[in-house]
Amino acid sequence: MFSKLKMKMKDPAFKKKSMIYAAVMAIFWAKMYFIQGGIFTLDIENANEAAILAFNPLSSIFLLFGVGIMLAGRKGMLATYIFGSLLLYVNVLFYREYSDFLTIPMLGQAANLAGMGGSITKILSVTDIFLFVDVLIAAFLLFYLKPERFQSFMPKRKEGLILAVIAIPLFLVNLGWATTERTELLERAFDRNMLVKYIGVLNFHAYDIVLQGQTEAKKTFADSNELSPVLNYINEQKTEPNSKMTGVAEGKNVIALSLESTQTFVVDNTVNGKELTPYFNDLKEEGAYFSNFYHQVKQGRTSDSEFLLDNSLYGLNRGAAFFTHSGNEYQATPEVLGEKGYFSSTMHANDETFWNRNVMYDSLGYDEYYSKKDYNVTEEKSYGWGYLDEYFFSDSLDKMEQMEQPFYNKMITLTNHHPFTLPEDKKFIEEGNTSSETLNRYFQTIRYQDEALKQFVEEFKKSDLYDDTILVIYGDHFGISENHKQAMGEYLDKDINEYEQFQLQRVPLLVLGEGIEPQENDTVGGQVDLRPTLMNLLGVEDENPVQFGQDLFSKDRREMMITRDGNFANEKYVGVNGNCYDRESGEPVEGEACAPGFKQAEEELALSDSVVYGDLLRYLDEIEMIEEKDSSKDKK
């Protein structure tokens, strides 16, 4: 056997074929290395990580081309080269927009692409064509040399199998090497940047397939016993709401106004000497303003912020619950308030199917969904993503004035959305002058949004609704990703390290209404706290025990905010990517000060995930029946 192999290796045709294999694979390796190291922001910290980044494409390349050759010879090799190139490019586009990597659940959200026209064109680049030049070179090497040489490098199926088998030890070496830098690497599925840095983007996708299989199995095999650790944890964390605020808005309407892509750094700030949010700066003096309030979204973006608001559960680390778990049983805010006589509605002048809202809103218990078809959307009133905020606000107020009261209404704005463009007559300030065109335009759309907000609130104050309504205004998620941290540093005149980047995830929260005293509250909180805060203000006894948030007004609340990445902020510290910082100063903190926070974040996210993935709220009635039986036995 070995003698035959030796003879074959001396064959000039075999040598030519091996050289072609090696050349094609080397070209693809160079492409992966360039994309992973030059386009993705993976924060290489030392020479060992740099070496791992160079090594990690190899196992996926051997597997990819091995499978291609086994299936269809040289045609299969070219097909897998094209497939791999397209997969890499889709990740490049996705990363430019979201600073994240594509996951299988996100593939189910392809319907959203129909509404992203302007945004997609902004993340495309003419230079992207150079990311496909190598495909032509590979095709030339495999097919377009002299015809009489075709047989010299016609791949054989067993050679494909050999390549695929070699991929296994290569990956094991890669994984073992990577764990010298980061122990329990595969347990950190929430940190996709870290996974790609250590095992490569194609291996990450293979791992994501494994995770998806595990996810699908969770609901199938879930049972009511899995609710017990969730309820035990929540009971241990439970604190009493602020009794002075209980029921101050009893029986009143609620308007929850979600401001698209609005971060706290714009509040009380200027560009070119002009205020970015002059109206909001004044308005926040009239109500309860929370200055240390963070968004907690991940890939679901605005839909995640809605999920947090209505359920006090965390969104998912992969994909969006609005798509992947729209069929679950929930006991959401609209449903609970509906039992108290509230009419519930949500308003967003986008396509009704965007983020699968037309399905998910039924599951959450909304009575009415006002989407694009319910607004007078014309070309003159639209730009970028669609209906301009000023018209959306005006039309929405008209609709609310006709609603049955009391009502719970959620409004979602649209204009301040990537790529942050406006018609000339809506630009109330000049662009910024940073190195990022995205950030420069963002200043203008923020200023426009503030003007549209002024129009809405002033009209709202004149309406009959004002005295009988509380208005909750909050940012849904960041608008400027970490891809623009150099420009953010230029604007804020500071180095944007990981602590500063974390602090940029704060979004404004303002609660307005009779009985709510003007105040600035610096308690650390997040979107998961919105529901219990709102329910306490309304004086509604919320019978759903599965909520991870706490009343933001409570003096006894735990000051703890957990991000979907497993990072956290509390009264003293900020924990980011395993590192610890003093929350006030931003100075690094040595030792294990943040270890309890990271542990709690991991536990809480896992418990919330178990509720969503297992659809555990369907078992609440069963748990309550058992508790009632136990209670009756105790009485006897």
Image (spheres, rainbow, N blue to C red):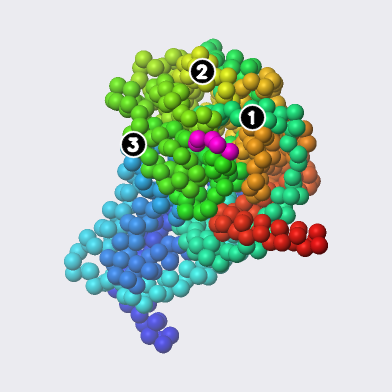
Magenta-highlighted residues: 340-344
Quarter of the image that includes the N terminus: bottom left
Residue nearest the viewer, comparing 541 with 76: 541
Residue nearest the viewer, comparing 152 with 58: 58
Q: Is residue 107 above or below residue 352?
A: below
The amino acid on which the numbered mark 2 sits, given as a three-letter code, is Asp
Q: Residue 37, labelled with which disc?
A: none
Q: Residues within 10 Å of mark 2 (few under 14, many from 20)?
A: few
Whole-Å distance between the Cαs marked 3 and 2?
A: 39 Å
Which residue lies under the disc numbered 2? 464
* 343 magenta-colored: yes
Q: Is residue 286 among the parts visible in the rendering? A: yes
Quarter of the image that includes the C terminus: bottom right
Q: Residue at x 51, y 18 (%)?
A: 464
The amino acid on which the numbered mark 3 sits, given as a three-letter code, is Gly
Which residue lies under the disc numbered 3? 117
* 227 magenta-colored: no
68 on left or right of 32: left
**Element under disc 3:** helix
Main SS category, magenta section: loop
**Element under disc 1:** loop
Q: Residue 250, labelled with which disc?
A: 1
Q: Residue at x 78, y 47 (%)?
A: 592
Residue 256: percent from left, percent from top = 54, 31
Assess whether mark 2 and mark 3 are in contact (beta carbons under 8 angstroms): no
165 on left or right of 533: left
Q: Residue at x 53, y 62 (%)?
A: 219
